[in-house]
Image (spheres, rainbow, N blue to C red):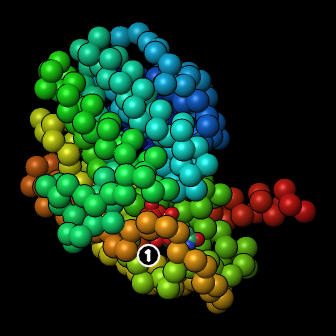
């Protein structure tokens, strides 16, 4: 993609802001839309003098139009378990009305479309690792359902716009991702444990820490997403790092990278917390020639300065 005019929703979020950077680096013009409910303008501050970037504060649940665009990346949604528990109805709305509104924009302007879907579509998976053909094991009424079912509804809607209106759509199923700009207070495991270690606080492990996740560094993820956007694939594609870690092992890596000999405190496991998660990325490898390059240790080292800055700011604010 280059010299295109591209709409990114959720532009002030963790992934949205990194996506804007990559699209601008490739020579595109970008219109970033966000209602700033969980995103932060700080993530876009470095683009304030970039003439090819325009920011529009807008809730995508209301119909809107930013003029002709060649491509739409729909990344707007609360995304951490803490945020979508707090903003349950908003999460359902953005994953339904928001997705419909952005698909209408793609249809109206004959633009390509890529939707940020999620490994949460697989729920607490009975199949391991998870490949795209697995339909998932989702509790439709549990605390995570506001996110999981909104994302599953979005996938159905995206496929319908492809089938009924021939929109050139793409679906990426994103697995746990981390890196600079991950919100420090969003309750996710990497942001929580990094900030706790750096602040000299005990690391909180939910349950016994034997549940697994597979963590992808943000630059690898964005590369995979851009390759998918350029492809002819319309069915979902997993993008993530298949290196699987128990949460306890992840905490140990964080202690090594931060050089801290921290304590661990065990807290109750949240309801419906998936016991394991690991992407099968054979499809992405074969289709896009993509695979992640950054190992967890290296990615945590690359994120250290960012988290140190966040913790310093927090300490100053609290003093
Ligand atoms: N977790 C933890 N301590 C924390 C935050 C999260 O042990 O301070 C666990 C959480 O219960 C889950 C895993 O880490 O099993 C990943 O949680 P996260 O919120 O990052 O995202 P999820 O993959 O559950 O959507």
Q: Residue at x 30, y 73 (%)?
A: 243
Relative image position of residue 9 (x, y in whole percent): 45, 31
Q: Disc 1 marks which residue?
A: 297
Number of marks drawn: 1
Relative image position of residue 51 (x, y in whole percent): 52, 21
* Up/down of 276 relative to 209, above or below: above
Q: Residue farthest to the left? A: 286
In this rendering, position of residue 214 left or right of residue 305? left
Q: Residue at x 54, y 62 (%)?
A: 188
Instruction: Please identify the quadrant where the N terminus is shown.
Output: top left
Q: Residue at x 28, y 61 (%)?
A: 137
Q: Would you identify the image quadrant in which residue 30 lies? A: top left
Residue 165 or residue 141, whichever sits in front: 141
Q: Residue farthest to the right? A: 319
* Up/down of 193 relative to 50, above or below: below
* Up/down of 49 relative to 238, above or below: above
In this rendering, position of residue 82 left or right of residue 140? right
Find out if the beta carbon at label 1 lies less than 8 Å from the nearest ligand 1 atom.
Answer: no
Q: Would you identify the image quadrant in which residue 165 lies? A: top left
* Up/down of 258 relative to 218, above or below: below
Give the SS element for disc 1: helix
Instruction: Please identify the quadrant where the C terminus is shown.
Output: bottom right
Asked if one can make out residue 114 in the rendered structure from this viewpoint, the answer is: yes
Q: Residue at x 50, y 85 (%)?
A: 208
Relative image position of residue 88 (x, y in whole percent): 54, 44
Asked if one can make out residue 253 in the rendered structure from this viewpoint, the answer is: no
- Crowding around mark 1 (Cα neighbors within 10 Å: few <14, some 14 to 19, many 20+) is some
Q: Residue farthest to the front? A: 141
In this rendering, position of residue 269 left or right of residue 239? right
Relative image position of residue 145 (x, y in whole percent): 43, 51
């Amino acid at each position: 993609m280059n010299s295109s005019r591209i709409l990114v929703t959720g532009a002030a979020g963790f992934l949205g802001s990194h996506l804007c950077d990559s699209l601008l680096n490739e020579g595109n013009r970008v219109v970033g839309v966000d209602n700033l409910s969980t995103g932060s303008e700080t993530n876009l501050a470095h683009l304030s003098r970039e003439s090819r970037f325009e920011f529009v504060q807008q809730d995508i649940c209301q119909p809107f139009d930013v003029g002709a665009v060649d491509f739409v990346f729909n990344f707007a949604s609360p995304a951490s378990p803490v945020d979508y528990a707090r903003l349950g109805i908003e999460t359902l709305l953005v994953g339904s009305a928001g997705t419909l509104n952005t698909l209408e924009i793609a249809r109206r302007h004959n633009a390509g479309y890529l939707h940020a879907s999620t490994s949460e579509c697989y729920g607490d998976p009975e199949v391991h690792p998870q490949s795209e053909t697995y339909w998932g094991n989702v509790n439709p009424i549990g605390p995570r359902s506001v996110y999981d079912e909104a994302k599953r509804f979005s996938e159905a809607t995206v496929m319908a716009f492809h089938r009924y209106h021939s929109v050139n759509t793409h679906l990426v199923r994103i697995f746990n991702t981390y890196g600079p700009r991950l919100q420090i207070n969003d309750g996710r495991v990497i942001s929580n444990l990094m900030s706790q270690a750096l602040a000299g606080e005990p690391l909180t492990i939910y349950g016994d820490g034997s549940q697994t996740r597979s963590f992808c560094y943000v630059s690898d993820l964005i590369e995979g997403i851009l390759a998918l956007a350029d492809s002819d694939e319309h069915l979902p594609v997993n993008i993530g790092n298949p290196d699987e870690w128990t949460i306890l092992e992840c905490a140990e890596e964080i202690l090594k990278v931060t050089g801290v000999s921290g304590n661990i405190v065990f807290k109750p496991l949240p309801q419906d917390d998936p016991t394991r998660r690991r992407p099968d990325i054979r499809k992405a490898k074969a289709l896009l020639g993509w695979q992640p390059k950054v190992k967890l240790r290296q990615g945590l080292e690359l994120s250290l300065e960012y988290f140190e800055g966040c913790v310093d700011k927090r300490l100053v604010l609290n003093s």
